[in-house]
């Protein structure tokens, strides 16, 4: 049973200053990337950061990331 | 629910069902099993250990996969499940006698013969364990201790604080008659687990840290008997890898900030299949 996590990038428009889902996950399933390609993180506009599930094999389905997201942008499905 | 909850608990916690402690289960065959168990424990354990330690990695993988594996076979005889302190207390509440006895694992592993980490419980004749079983070995029975419920609860609280994992054990499943207090170096079950043969289920629970409350003191990291908790120097917080967590609950006891929540394993999809 492998989870899929989808993040609505429009709702999640400033993940760098929020980071709630990254911090709450006990098995570090989520990661922070960019939609602007290879750049130094400091040079990128906030809206070009994206959150993605990167290690689905570690996801337990506890739903903490979805619960903690203040913008309701994270969805976990099986 | 673990498979024993389904088979022996009608879908509820099997170890909280008084029927699995009942005198009616104590037929001649089971009585003989119990007598043999204590008579031959050291010998069986020593032989078993030697056999386990001889397993090479290829055999280990085969043993793990095979239904005839050692731990799988133990499910019918002597099998356990980790339970947290509050469930120990629920069991103690419905028992009529509690006999604290020296731990056979510690005698085999460390040569320590008089450390009383095991609590034999019964819900019927109060002298079943002390008279019915142990009296025939005077050397052993001089080290046993009869406790009241209140005394036993206090002892379990102390053991919990010291990071000992509580677990129930069967004598011919589903008859439960002992609650043990284990630690990795002191327990044959843990030793088997290191060899890919785990004779006990994880608990019906898992723990989780509230990072808002955690101050990164790491007391929980030190006490977790399963190495499930890690510390991030960057975040200065701890977190629990729930795939490694056995749900023993001892981490809660040491967290001064009450930052550790205890969750129902069965409510978390992937963990509900992790026993
Ligand atoms: S014991 Fe509590 S406060 Fe200390 S690191 Fe663990 S969870 Fe955090
Ligand atoms: S993290 Fe899990 S296994 Fe470790 S002490 Fe806490 S409840 Fe027990």
Image (tube, coloured by chain):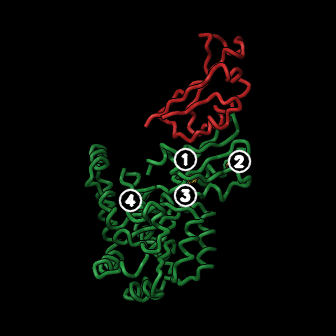
Residue at image mark 4 = B199
Distance between the alpha carbons at the discs numbered 2 and 1: 16 Å
Front tag of 2 and 3: 3
Residue at image mark 3 = B248
Q: Position of residue A23 (x, y in %)?
A: 66, 34
Distance between the alpha carbons at the discs numbered 1 and 4: 19 Å
B26 and B110: which is toward the camera? B26
Q: Few, some or many C-alpha atoms within 10 Å of disc 3 (few <14, some 14-19, many ≥20)? A: many
Q: Are marks 3 and 4 in contact (CB under 8 Å)?
A: no
Ligand 1 contact, mark 2 (Cβ < 8 Å): yes
Specify whether A54 is left or right of A48: left
Ligand 2 contact, mark 3 (Cβ < 8 Å): yes
Tell me the element at label 4: loop
Front tag of 2 and 1: 1
Q: Are marks 2 and 1 in contact (CB under 8 Å)?
A: no
Label 2 marks a residue whose chain is: B
Label 1 marks a residue whose chain is: B
Q: Few, some or many C-alpha atoms within 10 Å of disc 1 (few <14, some 14-19, many ≥20)? A: some
- Judge if badges 3 and 4 mark residues of a common chain: yes
Residue drawn at the location 45% of the way across and 87% of the way down: B125
Q: Which chain is red?
A: A
Distance between the alpha carbons at the discs numbered 3 and 4: 16 Å
B182 and B24: which is toward the camera? B24
Q: Which chain is green?
A: B
Number of the label disc, if any, that sits on residue B228 = 1
Tell me the element at label 2: loop
């Amino acid at each position: 049973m492998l989870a899929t996590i989808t993040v609505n990038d429009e709702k999640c428009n400033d993940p760098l200053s929020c980071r709630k889902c990254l911090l709450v996950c006990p098995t570090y399933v989520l990661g922070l990337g960019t939609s602007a390609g290879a750049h130094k993180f400091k040079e990128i506009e906030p809206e070009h950061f994206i959150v993605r599930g990167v290690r689905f094999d570690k996801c337990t389905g506890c739903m903490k990331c979805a619960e903690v997201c203040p913008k309701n942008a994270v969805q976990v499905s099986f | 629910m673990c498979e024993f909850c389904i088979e022996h608990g009608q879908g509820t916690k099997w170890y909280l069902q008084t029927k699995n402690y009942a005198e009616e289960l104590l037929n001649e065959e089971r009585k003989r099993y119990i007598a043999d168990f204590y008579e031959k424990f050291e010998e069986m354990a020593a032989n078993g250990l030697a056999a386990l330690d001889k397993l090479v990695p290829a055999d280990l993988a085969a043993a793990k996969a095979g239904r005839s594996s050692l731990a799988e076979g133990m499910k019918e005889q002597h099998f356990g499940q980790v339970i947290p302190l509050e469930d120990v207390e629920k069991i103690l509440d419905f028992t009529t006698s509690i006999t604290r006895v020296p731990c056979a694992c510690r005698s085999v592993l460390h040569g320590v013969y008089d450390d009383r980490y095991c609590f034999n419980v019964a819900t019927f004749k109060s002298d079943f364990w002390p008279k019915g079983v142990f009296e025939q070995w005077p050397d052993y029975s001089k080290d046993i201790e009869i406790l009241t419920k209140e005394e036993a609860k206090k002892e379990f609280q102390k053991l919990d604080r010291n990071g000992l994992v509580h677990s129930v054990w069967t004598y011919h499943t589903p008859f439960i008659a002992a609650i043990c207090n284990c630690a990795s170096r002191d327990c044959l079950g843990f030793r088997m687990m290191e060899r890919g043969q785990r004779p006990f289920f994880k608990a019906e629970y898992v723990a989780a840290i509230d990072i808002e409350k955690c101050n990164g003191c790491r007391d929980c990291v030190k006490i977790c008997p399963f190495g499930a908790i890690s510390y991030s120097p960057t975040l200065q917080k701890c977190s629990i890898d729930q795939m490694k967590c056995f749900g023993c609950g001892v981490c809660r006891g040491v967290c001064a900030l009450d930052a550790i929540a205890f969750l129902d394993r069965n409510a978390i999809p992937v963990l509900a299949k992790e026993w």
